[in-house]
Amino acid sequence: MAVTSNWCRCTSCHAGYGWKDRHFDFAPEKIDCLVCHDTTGTYKKFPTDCGYPPLKDKLFAGKKLFKAVNLSYVAQHVGRTSRESCGKCHFYSGGGDGVKRGDLDSTLRAPSRELDVHMDAEGLNFTCATCHTTVAHEIDGRHYDTPAPGARRFALPKDDGHRVRCESCHGRRPHRAEKKLISLKHLKLNDHTDRLACQTCHIPFYGRGLPTNIYWDWSTAGRFKNGKPIVEKGPLGRPIYHTKKGTLKWGKNLVPEYHWYNGTMRYLLAGEPLRLNAKGQVLLIAPAGEPDDPQSRIFPFKPHYGRQPFDPVKRTMVIPKLFGNKGSGAFWTEYDWQKAVTAGMTEAGLPFSGKVAFIETVHYIPLSHMIPPKEKALKCAECHVRQGGRMEKITGIYIPGRDSFLWVDRIGIFICVLTLFLVTVHGLFRMVMSLKRR
Amino acid sequence: MKEKIFLYPRFERFWHWTQAFLIVLLLLSGFEIHGSLRIWGFEKAYYLHVYCAAGLLILTAFSIFWHLTTGSWRHYWPVKEKIPQICYYYAVGIFRREAHPFEKRPDQKLNPLQRIVYLFLKIFLYPLQFVTGGMLFLYKWWPKLGIKATFSGTVYWHLLGAYAFLLFFILHIYLTTTTRPWYNHIRAMVLGWEEVEVR
C-alpha cells in the first residue's frame, strides 16, 4: 500500500498542491501554507482532489458536503499551528481517526490530563509544536532530517532549539523527590534511563483515546452483498469488514510491544526482497537497535499487523492502485487485484510477475504521545517478575526478578533443603535417644 | 555440678540480635527481588533490602570497632586443637550424652569449628555481599569508579553469597539447640549468662 498510483486520494494529506502523478515537482510554491497556518478551522482539503481545497461546494462520495473555502478569509486569519491544525492530517493517518498511530487521534484536540499530561487543555495545554520545534520550517520529528532521539540537547519551552525528546526538558535524571533531599525511589528510577526510554514506563497503554486498528486483512476486500458494498461494524464502533478495505481488527487500551530502538527504523522499500520475522511475517517497518549499543533504549511500539498483496514469483511487496476511475484498473472501482497491482506497479516503474498472492505483514509504530500523569506509569513488578512481565521478550540484559541463574538456584536450594533435612533427622535422633534413656 | 558464667556483654547481644534480624530480612527481601519469593512485592522488597543493607553496614562498622578496641577479635583466631573430637561429638557423642569436648570459658567463647566458620563469614562472606551488593546498588557509577564488571556476573556472586548465608542460617539455628536444655545457648545470647558443666 503506498501513495504511488493513488496520488489524488492520498495527497489530501501527503502534502502538496496538485500532486497527481509521479512527475510532481516539489517546488516551494506547491507547499500548502494554509493547511498548517489556518486558524479559522474552515480550511479543509477535498479528500480526492490531489491536495486542493474545494473552491465550490462539493459532495464527497455522494454524501459528505465540503463547503467552498473562502481563501481570502482564511488568508487574513493565519497564525501559529495548533493541535487542531496538525491533527487535521495526523489524527487521521491510515485513513481514519486513530487508525494507524495508536497514540494520536482526535481526542487530542482538547485532551484531559489523564489522556495527555502535556496537552491537557485545562493544564499545560501544549500544542504539537511545543515539542516538535521548528527552525526555518523544518519540523523536529522522527521522519524528518534527524531521528527524534538525535542529540540529547537541553531546551526548555522558553528557549529556542530542538526539543522533540523527553530529555530536552526533563534531563537525563528526570525523577526528583518533591520534598526529600534524597529518595531511594527516585535514585533507582533514574538508574533506569540508561536502558529504558521514558516512553517505556510512561506510556503503559496505547489506543487510550479512540480504538486503533491492529490488523488489516486486505485479501478479503471486494465482497458484496446483493451487489452492494458491505460495511459491518464491530463492538468498538469501527468497521470489522469493509468491501474496499477487507477485514479489520481494532483495539483499545492495549499493551505495547517492546524492542531495542536506536531512533531509526528499517524500512522495506518497494521492490526490495522480503525480510521475514520468526513468525513468517514480512517486516515492513521495524525498529533498529541493539542491547550493546549505548544509544539504544528499550522502547514501546504498536505492532500493526496485516495481510497484504505481494508478488509470489519475484518475492517483493507490490503497490496496488486503489483509487482511480473505471478503466484505470483501480481496486476500489474494479475490485480485481491483478489489474490493480498491474496498474500500480506500472505507475511505480517496478517489475511485476503478473501473479498476486497475500502475505502476513507487520510494521511497528514507536509510541511517544498520550503520556498519562506520572501516577499511571508502570510499577516495578510489571517488568521485574519471573514470567509474564512486560520485558519478557527483551534480550541482552539481566533483569532482576525476571532472570536467574538456573543452576545456582537449583544447587543452592538443593544444598539448603538437604541440610534442613539432615539437621531435622539429627534432631529427631537426639530426641529418640534421650526418650530411650528415660 | 553447674556454674553460671557471663559470656556475652550487652553490645554483643545487641549486635547479634540486630544482625540476625537484618540478615533474615535481607534474605527474604533479597530472594523476593531475585524472584524466588512473594511477600512484599518487588518495589517494597527492594527498598527493604537497601535499608537493611545500610543498617547492617553501620552495625558492622560499630562491631568492627568493638572487636578491635575490646580485643574480642581474639575469639575468632583459628586453632587446630580438638577439631576431630568435635566432629566425633556431633556425629556420635551427642547421642550418647557425652560431654562436649570443648570447654566454654569467658576467654574462649567459641569452639575451634565456630572460629573457622565465623572467620570465614567475617573475612569472606560479609565482604563479598557488601561489595557485590554495593556494586549492584551503584551500577550506574561503574564507569566513573573505574569498575569493569558485568551486571549479571555481579548478581551471580551476590546470589552465591545469599545461598551461603541461608545455609549458615539453617545450620546455626539448629546448632544453637544442641545443648541441654535445648534453649541454653539461646538463653545465654539473650541474658548474657550461660550455664556450663564444671569439670
Image (cartoon, helix red, strand yellow):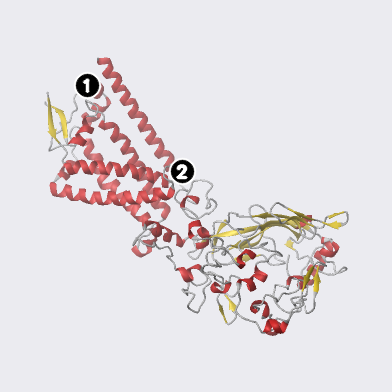
Amino acid type for the residue under numbered disc 1: Arg
Can I make out residue A244 in this image? yes
Q: Position of residue A392 (x, y in %)?
A: 53, 50
Relative to A417, say whether A179 is above or below: below
List the residue tagged with mark 2: A406
Q: Disc 1: which chain?
A: B
Dot label at residue A4 = none
User: Closest to the observer: A323 or A280?
Assistant: A323
Dot label at residue B97 = 1
User: Closest to the observer: A3 or A230?
Assistant: A230
| Residue displayed at 65% across by 52% down | A279
In the image, taking residue A135 as reference, residue A285 lies left or right, namely right
Same chain for mark 2 and mark 1? The answer is: no
Q: Disc 2: which chain?
A: A
Amino acid type for the residue under numbered disc 2: Leu
Q: Position of residue A350 (x, y in %)?
A: 76, 69
Tags 2 and 1 in contact by the CB under 8 Å rule?
A: no
Q: Position of residue A247 (x, y in %)?
A: 75, 55
Q: Quadrant of the C terminus of chain A?
A: top left
| Residue displayed at 64% across by 82% down | A78
User: Closest to the observer: A428 or B74?
Assistant: A428
Mark 2, secondary structure of its residue: helix
